[in-house]
Amino acid sequence: MDVKYVQTTCPYCGTGCTFNLVVKDGKVVGVSPYQRSPVNEGKVCPKGTYAHEFVNSEDRLTKPLIKKDGKFVEASWDEAYDLIAKKFKGYKPDEIAVLSSARVSNEENYLLMKLARGVFKTRHIDHCARLCHSSTVAGLAASFGSGAMTNSIGDIAESKCVFVIGSNTFEQHPLIGRKIMQAKANGAKLIVFDPRFTPTAKQADLYGAFYSGTDVAIFNCLMGEIIRNGWEDKEWVSTRAKGYDELKAMVTKEAYLPENVEKICGIPAADLKTAAEWIGKAESSALLYSMGITQHTVGVDNVKSTANIQMLTGNIGRRGGGVNALRGQNNVQGACDMGALPVVFTGYQKVIDPAAHKKFADAWGFPDGICAPENGYEVTTMINVLTDKPGELKAMYIMGENPMLSDPDLTHVKEALEKLEFMVVQDIFLTETAALADVVLPASCYAEKSGTQTSTERRVQLWRPAQDPPGEARLDWKILCEVGAAMGYEKQFAFKSAEDVFTEIAELTPSYHGMNYERLNRPEALHWPCPALDHPGTPILHIGKCAHPDGMGVMHALEWKPPAEVPDAEYPYILTTGRCIWHWHTGSMTRRSQHLDEEVPTGWIEINPEDAKDLGIANKELVKAITRRGEVEVPARVTPDIKKGEMFMPFHFAECAANVLTNNALDPICKIPEYKACAVKVEKIKEA
Ligand code: SF4
């Protein structure tokens, strides 16, 4: 028997753990530890442990599919490419929209961005970062000039105080949770604020249960306490920050005194004061957040608030400090870095900047030019345009995304996608979205290809191929090059390998200039920015100066605003959503993983025992959850781990899809939907 071990990077969360794939007779059959990774040091979480199980699922797509008379029929690659080229050549640039993917490699995101802007000439490209961390990109860029996690994962273990808000780190980023425990073992205090008493909260020295959507009030309160007690870092504030006076005037208002904020958020005033003291007095304090902060109509304000408190306490550019935005998907950082966003090329070079636009147009050499130097639509805007402005968008190319489960208000999403004249989906499974497509292209998974992905800590790491794609499925980077060639642009897509593509990325992207596969082929890989071949990479950002042109950090004075939809007599509870440790996003991979599926085979709604008693609902009873968008039947999980008045649903499960219920109200700046707070009612299901 032929057995080999292939070192690669986990395809699930943004932590970026490394493990070995065990390959027997040419097929991936297991995962085994790789001890030399500085990120996970040989450990993996349950998803990583079973990351091989979906790879050879019987459900893998193995042939191109073309829909004829409402049914998919198998087709050859040439037939599929001919149809795609014929159709897309018939649309004007602004009639085409493209969705790239946080699941695939940097090289593939780059190629789809090039295909969108260079071949289709459309401005409309986005991906699911819009739905998870677009507020991080916008908020941290406004505060520091750069929109990414400031410190490294390993650095969290150095902290003397860890403040986790809006992140169930132990379930969503378990190997980052391990660093929190290392910090605790080194004497750090752990503060966790969350509406749920999560596994992360259970490890806290101070836990605060708050109502979803009250984050800015909490931060203002903490900062007011810090300033009133003189715990701010006066030197940092006076030499490195702008906007302190306005911030001070805002956060020291009477409205943000702990006793008043207790009434808004539900955390006792004494606990708010204790948290402020621990953060304000700590030698270093790391702030960790995730989608609990970002997925709000005030997502950008929430993110700016995290930056405010870390600047106020001098925890920017400091070991053990930082604003640590934990990115959810394996390569959501990289997909943003690669310009799979409607406003930037790679490395956040603005599409509307004439110099950047010319740089890419010249480098790519499309004889008929590239997209207009204008911003395009966000994915959430694309969906609204499809229903509200019929005929404006007509065709869509979707790679590795599943908006039919991931986007808010799914009834509306289905109505929108069904209005498209032509839709192509490139994926490894026939997802809920692929089922609506006109052409489905069978793609490859992480275990089958070379490429890079960029983790939440900006670490760029390699994938290495362990087996061939099944059947006639092809490598994604090759598919994209072949589509480009079919559209008549062979020269612009004449890449021989993923490494070849990375060379072009590095040439065009200042923060990746100093990277190549040879430099990345070592356990520690490289953190961006890495501007030159002799540069060691940058694990901690903003040491000495921020990334704004003047080097200063910008503080923002922000007033708290309630969520777009708050409980009322008809819908009396707050619904919030999230993930569980066993599943990942829309479940297309984890639900095809036998062990993970056995652990948690379906969804649930968490209800506080007092609320359940009021509603006459028993644990495990099937109930109806209803919002203004729709209703789903879902088993109740009655638990004191959810705050009274709040309810929680995981969003992985198509049969009880939380996103049928969620609100598509958007943050006005970054257009992220408010997944984390809407008004809900729950009813018993009456027997027929
Ligand atoms: Fe994979 Fe994240 Fe688990 Fe690490 S923590 S093994 S990256 S899912």
Image (spheres, rainbow, N blue to C red):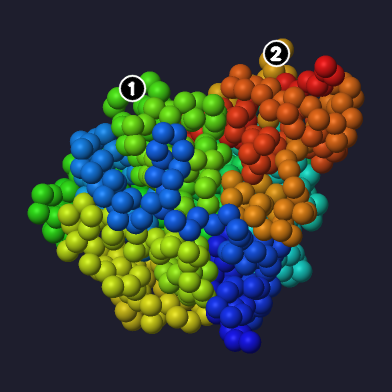
Is tag 2's residue or tag 1's residue first in the polypeptide sequence?
1
- Asked if 667 appears above or below 529 in the picture, the reply is above
| Most foreground residue, 345 or 443 | 443
Is 520 on the left or on the right of 634, as rendered? Answer: left
Please state which amino acid type lies under the numbered disc 2: Glu
- Asked if 74 appears above or below 594 in the picture, the reply is above
Label number found at residue 521: none
Residue 431 at what x, y percent from top left?
Answer: 53, 45
Q: Tell me the quarter of the picture where residue 218 sits.
A: top right
Is residue 277 visible to the viewer in this orientation of the structure? Answer: no
SS at mark 1 in the image? loop
Is 664 on the left or on the right of 164, as rendered? Answer: left
Which residue is the site of mark 2? 570
Tell whether label 1 touches label 2 (CB within 8 Å).
Answer: no
Q: Residue at x 44, y 45 (%)?
A: 73
Residue 114 at what x, y percent from top left?
Answer: 27, 54
| Most foreground residue, 174 or 276 | 174
Task: Residue lying at the far top in this picture: please name it.
Answer: 569
| Most foreground residue, 532 or 254 | 532
Which residue is the site of mark 1? 390
Q: Residue at x 60, y 33 (%)?
A: 659
- Which mark lies nearer to you, 2 or 1? 1
Is 515 on the left or on the right of 434, as rendered? Answer: left
